[in-house]
Image (cartoon, rainbow, N blue to C red):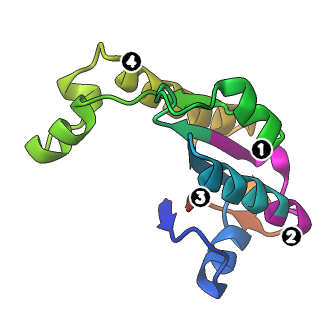
Amino acid sequence: MVVDSPPDFTPAVIAAVDVSSHICMVGMLDTLSLKNTKLGLETLELMGYDGSAVSLVLNRAQSQVGLNHSDVEAIVGRKPDVFVPSDRDVPRSLNEGVPVVQGKSRSQVAGAFRELATLYLGAADVNGNGNGDVPAQNGRRRRGLRIWRAG
């Protein structure tokens, strides 16, 4: 299951985190988003969430805004797992109702989304099953993927 949440830790977001097996945190290449991403990662750590179950995606990663990928790592404290480039095909695919990985399968952005999917498919295989269930730290089973966007 994928849950797209607001960029803050409301009670509903905390409840979703508590039952998730993985979190995909999405940040962008601007200082406000990166600061919020860092705060989100720190909050998850304080909540006792396993950092190895958190994927970091940098959206619009090739934007020329005065920050580079090493700046991202310095600000956030870790290297993003997936870099999604800016691409005009993304809004076009939304307008056309065709996923970019189908309509423009050879594009860099489609490749980034496949890389993200592979990351999660690999996590399911490593855990010995294909349904995304992993034991939670409290002994219960966690299900699903949680998407968190840094404001």
Mark 3 vs mark 2: which is more N-terminal? 2
Residues under numbered marks 3 and 4 in contact, where contact means CB atoms less than 8 Å apart = no
Q: Where is residue 149 in the image (x, y as percent from the top left)?
A: 55, 58
Q: Which amino acid does label 4 sit on?
A: Gln
Q: Which of 112 and 32 is in front in this view?
A: 32
Tell me the distance, in whole angstroms, between the alpha carbons under discs 4 and 2. 35 Å
Q: Mark 1 points at which residue?
A: 76
Q: Which residue lies furthest to the top in this view?
A: 106
Tell me the distance, in whole angstroms, between the alpha carbons under discs 1 and 4. 24 Å
Front position among marks 4 and 2 = 4
Tell me the distance, in whole angstroms, between the alpha carbons under discs 2 and 1. 18 Å
Q: Residue furthest bottom?
A: 11
Mark 3 vs mark 4: which is more N-terminal? 4
Q: What residue type is labelled 1?
A: Val
**Of helix, strand and loop, which one carries label 2?**
loop
Query: At x 18% / y 26%, what residue is drawn?
Result: 103
Placement of 113 over or under 11, stated as above or below: above
Q: Name the residue under label 3.
A: 150
Tell me the distance, in whole angstroms, between the alpha carbons under discs 3 and 1. 11 Å
Query: At x 59% / y 58%, what residue is drawn?
Result: 150
Tell me the distance, in whole angstroms, between the alpha carbons under discs 3 and 2. 17 Å
Question: What's the magenta region?
Answer: 43-56
Residues under numbered marks 2 and 1 in contact, where contact means CB atoms less than 8 Å apart = no
Q: Mark 2 points at which residue?
A: 47
Q: What residue type is labelled 3?
A: Ala
Mark 2 vs mark 1: which is more N-terminal? 2
Q: What residue type is labelled 2?
A: Met
Q: Mark 4 points at which residue?
A: 108
Tell me the distance, in whole angstroms, between the alpha carbons under discs 3 and 4. 23 Å
Query: At x 84% / y 40%, what residue is drawn?
Result: 77
Q: Position of residue 25 (x, y in %)?
A: 62, 51
